[in-house]
Amino acid sequence: MVADDEEEYFPRGGQTGRIATKKNFVFEKENKANKEPKKKLGKRERKKLKQQKGLKSNKDGEDGSEKEDEGADESFNDYEAANVDSSVKETRIKKFQPLSYHNLAEEMVILCSVNTILSNSIKVSLPERLLCTIDYQDISTPLKESRSGNLNKIFRVGDIITCKIKSVRKRSGDSEVKATSDPAEINSDLDHNDVHVGSVFLGAVKSVEDHGYLIFSGISGLNTFLPFTHCDVEVRKNKNRGDRKRLPVGKLVWCKVVKSTAAEGSKNVQVSTKNDDFNRVQLSEDLISQKSLLPGMKFNLTVTKHVGRDLEVTVEGMDSRGFIPHSHLKSIACLANDFQIGVKLLGTVLYKYPISDVAAFSLRVEPTSQEKQDLETGEVFERAEIVSHDRRGLGVKFVRDDKTYYGIVSRRRMEGDLNGKKLEELFPKGNHLNVVVIGYHHIDQLYSCSTENDLLRGTLLTMTQLREMVGKAVTVEIKEIKERGAVVMIDKRTAFVPDNQVTDTLGSQPLKKLQVNSKHKGRILRVDSEKNAIFVTLRPSLVNNKPLTDFSKATKGDAYYGSISSRGDDKIGVAFFNGLKTEISQVNLIMDAHKYKVGELDARHSKHDRHSEHDRHSEHDRHSEHDRHSDHDRHSNSPHQEPV
């Protein structure tokens, strides 16, 4: 969960709109006086052509008003992009617009970063501070087939992956974007003949063998093997032996081809995930083709033109052009004029527009990047320097401990009415502002910031403050009701109430008891800063009784409520606040273990003032509250307990 200037935590959706119908041309077909006869198009070609016609841009000099996520500062002069097939002739870029919800297109393949990890999906950050969702079944084919993968073990916040846009839904300015990261979809246009030593692609762990991993690539005729010796994985050691930490089945991995052997109708490749190999092994120039322009691949670029704040470049080894958006220069403080015409650069493919082979590149992000959020949400900087402007807001620079950070203050996050006013005049470059950090976008390596007074005054709590508040009573406001819970606000921070944390009585539709904009008393259940997530409970027995947040602080004789999180033949698991868990063996249970229901409340007395690591799992008396909650037994469809 990230407080964000685009979609906060959960983007909202509505009616399907595949491609924006506003005038946001990215491509425009050039009209020729002598047109060639049109050949009859197949279903796939008609779909591509329809997408191409839908990608339109505002003409120069038209209405200067803008949506929040729109923004095209300068135009490229017309230049020809490579033909995709015979049905698309002389495709030219008329105007480059930064990526936005309005020009996202289905089947667009984009480099992205993991933003939030949930139980059945992940939220990812796209370039230009956009968000989208990848559902569990769309992460990878091996993960879907295994049906046992834990997303918390597969991903870390900040992981760089690739996604392919499946749908874009819009309603009243809100957007819900769905994507897939399955290599079967990402690499669907490739076959084994397109893969060579030096190629980079996204794969997924299919199985663990004696000496390495079989990798699922989704590429026809390609057999991929990742040896343990070529894998950057930490080694865990204990007193008796050193155990190598294995990659879980279904995990997405970036693969750099280091060895290739051709066979009849197929190819066997050996790949590496080591940073050294990604930097050392390069694709031979004579093997570079348009199909090599995949997100994550690095290319040598030559600057050919300054286009407003952006750079037009050519790709060495192929007759292809592209651009570097201002947001992915070396920093947002850079100017296009800082790069001389003809200068050589090394850039990573960020995304490629559909239909055309024109790609956007980044000078900062690469597949092996593991960006971390150093600054906490809620931190205030009193002298953030203004370093850039665009139609969406201000670029700012701030320093802590001699390290420089960059952020964006969007128009909607600025104090006061800015309608019709030029940011360059109100906020000259070099001036300073007071800003508060409200989120981080790993793919752009930018902090989202605000100058709003209520946030600057400390209304927005930092993650450290929230961790200290676990177990504390809070008032939450319901903002949105989702399938598996409710999105709520706590002092300007977005949080989540799982569906099994709404009422004491387990039922099939607990969320019907909630209404949007209603306020409720709750307690912070746990805070996960690694996954940018805050979880809240509204269950009266947990809200109105003393919470257990630390086993070492348990008081002898006190009773603490917890939720039954698991059950076995001879024991049950109970979860408390702050992620605390313990097990109760059958000897300490009143009923048979299998008769307890996951999600049911359980109150237990503390037998000791202080619990050792061993005691806390074995020396708790069972205090029966079964009669108080006997109606739970009538509900056979108890929802699965969200991890706490």
Image (cartoon, rainbow, N blue to C red):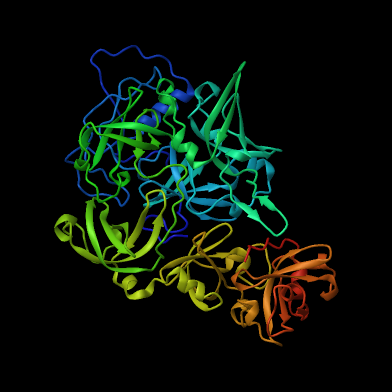
Q: Which residue is farthest left?
A: 425
Left or right side of 632 for 206: left
Query: Is 9 situated above or below 558?
Result: above
Q: Residue at x 41, y 24 (%)?
A: 290
Work out whether residue 303 can be spotted: yes
Task: Please provide percent x and percent y for residue 89.
Answer: 33, 19
> Which of these two is toward me, 364 or 202?
364
Q: Residue at x 55, y 41 (%)?
A: 253
> Which of these two is toward me, 507 or 425?
425
Query: Is 641 situated above or below 227?
Result: below
Task: Please provide percent x and percent y for residue 141.
Answer: 62, 38
Q: Tell me which corner region of the image, top left, top right, bottom left or bottom right, holds residue 470.
A: bottom right
Q: Residue at x 24, y 50 (%)?
A: 391
Quadrant showing the C terminus: bottom right
Task: Please provide percent x and percent y for residue 360.
Answer: 35, 36
Q: Tell me which corner region of the image, top left, top right, bottom left or bottom right, holds residue 228.
A: top right
Q: Which residue is farthest bottom?
A: 557
Q: Which residue is farthest front?
A: 240
Left or right side of 455 for 422: left
Left or right side of 276 for 622: right
